[in-house]
Image (cartoon, rainbow, N blue to C red):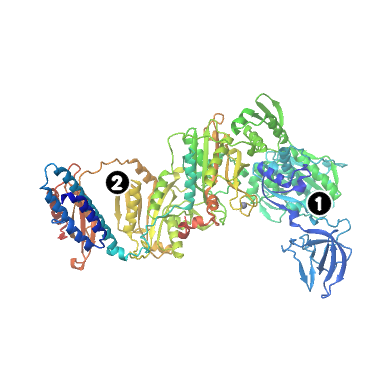
Amino acid sequence: MKISLNWLKDYIDLTGISDEEVISNLTMSGLEVEDYEDQAKLYDKFIIAYVKEKDKHPNADKLSLCKLTDGKVDYQVVCGAPNVAAGQRVVFAKEGAIVPNGGFQIKKAKLRGIESFGMICSESELNLSDDHSGIIVLDDSYEIGKSFAEAFGLNDVVLEIGITPNRPDALSHIGVARDLAAIFNRELKIPKVELKESAQDVNTEAAIEIIDAVDCPRYTAKVVKGVKIKESPEWMKRRLKAIGLRPINNVVDITNYVMYEAGQPLHAFDLDKVGGKKIIVRKAGADNKFVTLDSKERVIEAESLMICDGNKPVAVAGVMGGENSEISAQTENILIESAYFNPSSIRKTSKRLGLSTDASYRYERGCDPNNTLYVAERAAQLMAELGEGTILKGSIDVYPEKINEKTVRLRESRTFRILGYKIEREKIKNIILNLGMKIIAEEEDVFKILIPTYRPDIEREIDVIEEIARIHGYENIPAVERIANSLDAKIDESEFIEKARNTATSLGFYEILNNSLISEKAAELMGKSIQVLNYQSADMSNLRTSLLQGMLQTISKNIKVGEKNLRLFETGNVFIKKADIIKSFDDFSESTKLILAITGSDAEKEWHSKERAIDFYDLKGLVDSFLGNLFQNSALRDSYNEESDSIYSYYYTKESGKETVGSGGKIKKELLKQFDINQDVYCFEFDVDKLKSLLNIKSKFKELLRFPKIERDFAFIFDKNISNSEIKDYILSCKSKLLKNVRLFDLFESETFGSAKRSLAYSLEFYDENKTLTDEEVDKEFTELTLSVKKKFNAELRGI
Amino acid sequence: MLENIDSIGLDFDTELQGVKDLKQLEEIRIKYLSRNGIVAGLFEQLKNASKEEKPRLGKELNALRNSVQEKFDNLKSSIEENSSEESSKIDLTLPGRNRIIGSKHILVQTLEEMKSIFKGLGFSVFEGPELESDYNNFTALNFPLDHPARDMQDTFFITEDFLLRTHTSPVQVRVMQKVKPPIRAIMPGKVYRNEAVSSRSLCVFHQIEGLYVDKDVTFAELKGTLISFARQFYGKDLSYRFRPSFFPFTEPSAEMDITCYLCKGKGCRICKHTGWLEILGCGMVDPNVLENAGVDPEEFTGYAFGMGIERTALLKNGITDIRLFVENDYRFLKQF
Ligand SMILES: [Zn+2]
């Protein structure tokens, strides 16, 4: 909200306090000044000057050569305006001035051979109007040498204050002044209203009836007759413009002016257009169409509160007036509405209409129900003054049930306990009183405080403590550092994932973070997905069901910028819908996943090694290294699947008991094509929650082997359809006491074996935990194993 | 000759000094250390020595043999090293065989740094779900129904009662329901706001939440803890300030500002000419929030705070466009 400092000074004397102090004190007490504009700076180096002489420019017909003075210094200026003449008072832009319209800087210049030291301004150049037909000629009341900003009252400083939703009281100049009064301990000056009223009673001209008193607890009206609709005076227009409002006519301007003065929205009806001269406040009911002031026809829901006349709605209560009762140039008689509406009712109507106005903004935050009469009178007074109207005697004020001020008990001891700092009792009292609260009883520790109705946010003790703290100043509460002991057993729910991240990066993976919102099509690839009701765009409509889609998108984008060799990982949550309608946490699952992905070459081409395309075994090795680092003894089983599914050409899973803790493989070409990728991609996705549960399997320390190991190698030519793991499992299953490990170390295919055969070479590791083995002992078992393998697989032993 | 053991040692040293290559060295070996060499000859003579002198001479002779052998070995390996084929041809300027080590996302690095500071201050770490109930995200945190405070956070709804959490604060509620006070915890995580994506804002981003509930937690201590954090995280020379603000779930509420990094407080475009940058929101836990979570506000008080990770990482690393965090460009990732 914009606040004009010049305007603010009507309500508080800020003598001796600089603008900077005002700004910083507002910010530091909760009314954050987000930005401000110093108009005087905008008009820096623009002054009122006097044209002493005017001659023709020797080299140009349309230019004149003038001598100006600011009372002390003379300036030679070349001017192109037709209306310039000696003896005029003009607005003069000196060297260095920046012209508001266009933003260019005035410099010393030679015009047709004659030097010019500034510019005489038109209204257009100063952004005062569009008139650029000639320079501004001022009357003699303008003091020569004075700054233009001061002379024109454009020396205002306008603040942009971010008002938090709990502070409806601060949505006006008086509201902001009230905080300043408390901060600087100065008096708040609220304009006195003295009305000259006619003999005619207001009740003879208008009537009010509230049907819905829940949503409209109070409706106050004044009537002003014989108003002349015209432009507002300059001072009012200037203030409204300063805070960003467009002046319209005196009546509309007054309602805006008073709202920004006192925070209470007002509406002015053309009384002659109010049927039956009667206002009825009721729910819209069957009146479901209504044309608002902005000439838009709106659909009104039955529960919306409407202001109606004898026959029809004339305004959407608290939101916007209707075109049918709008103030026009012909309007003479005015009914001023100053009401208090139920905040949540106005909020609902405003939301349903998608229409937020200055009025609804204030009503939904909560206005002061006990200030409507003052504000109506204030507006009536201004209409009489600025529109030559006659105020009818009295007011119509329907207020069936008075909203009383709340009382709050404040304990001094509690204030200390919350803040950790003792504010003097006198200071506490002072703050309370300066903010307009009343102390109605005072005991040793307890104050009984009456809260004014313009502060709907203050309802409890803690609310008052906050007021005391913010006015006293947070900066004046010392910072206390205590040595913190750990409170209990160390809990870090993110510890495992942090370790997993460390492991992945040590394996050369870079971490990515993707949006959890993806397109419905992508989300549905990997399970039943959940859609956001109010999504922004179709490519961010559903929650991800897997990390795979985002990963493929990332890979695709990177390949396009030339990064083709990638090792990436991501960890994050995925969401699967379990019931058609989500009514509880059981109807969907949210689980943490971690995905590893590789594509391209193992390494760049280097002097010492050839570039090698990544394949399935890279993935497998990385997955095993990853798991090996996280779990020393995870006892996970691999389960392979050569058949393709909708995602993978082939894949495998890691199993623990009956649980699958992760799966991955080679991504299908068809799927890659959807993501515009034309190189192989291998991915493996873990279920982090299941991985975490493996941490419960504790691995025990194994004594270090004190006796040497002995290795023996053999190689066989096998049928190709016999898998490595079949052979390995068989060797280990043979009853050899000394054999502890089997490792494939060579794979060889050759035409001499035929295309259906291959050679596999294994290294067998033998040892005994309790003694040194002899070659004879090992040879005996090795020979038996060799024979068993040969027999079992009908394999041909190769000489090594 | 046995009397000359010392001088034989000196002779050997002298001859060794003249050796330039393995061939010369071999000649010396034959002369001194071979089966018919000088040292072996001395041992031969030892047999004839007198009974009294034998032990002393034997000891001296062994020492000579060991010293000669050692000196010979040393020289031999040094000559071999210098004259080996490899060293004569090696190009030390060839690039090494690199092993690629990846890196964590810069946001995660930022978050982990914050986490470790708070862990040092005695905070535990808890996590909570991203798809939350409206109750936990708003109602339990003292956002009244139909109140403009709800407009402070543009929300992605899943149903009327479920939504994507707009802040990490609902984890406060979950932790208080799970753990009895005293509680001192931080809660990092992903949050969602229905806002337009631009160079300054994302609709999915990260926050870290803090909560301390105990019998005597005060606003003064909240300030102390956060200043301690800020000094560790941003550097100890910075200035900071706390100014009043509004969050429905804390009261009194505050925002903490630190001196603008870029202009050092002089005022610039980034700090909107104030010289200050807002880094976090905080306050004393509202009694309603404690009560909603089953904690007696007369017995316990608490403070809470929350801050965004993205903005912090932008500032600390001089990154200009927040969207870079989710574009996952390898060239960006590799810089951190
Ligand atoms: Zn700055």
Mark 1: which amino acid? Trp
Q: Where is residue A558 in the image (x, y as percent from the top left)?
A: 45, 62
Q: Which of B182 and A588 is in front in this view?
A: B182
Residue occupying image coordinates x 81% and y 68%: A79
What mark, if any, has residue B229 been given in the picture?
Answer: none
What mark, if any, has residue A235 been given in the picture?
Answer: 1
Location of the C terminus of chain A (image quadrant) = bottom left
Q: Position of residue A232 (x, y in %)?
A: 81, 53
Q: Is mark 1 within 8 Å of ligand 1?
A: no
Chain name for mark 2: A
Q: Where is residue A524 in the image (x, y as percent from the top left)?
A: 44, 55
Please tell me which of labels 2 and 1 falls first in the chain.
1
Classify residue A173 by image quadrant: top right
What mark, if any, has residue A635 been given in the picture?
Answer: 2
Q: Residue furthest left?
A: B48
Mark 2: which amino acid? Ala
| Vertical order, B120 against A789 (above or below) | above
Classify residue A682 as left or right of residue B112.
Answer: left
Query: Which secondary structure, mark 2?
Result: loop
Q: Which residue lies furthest to the top in this view?
A: A444
Chain name for mark 1: A
Marks 2 and 1 belong to one chain: yes
Q: Can residue A725 be seen in this view?
A: no
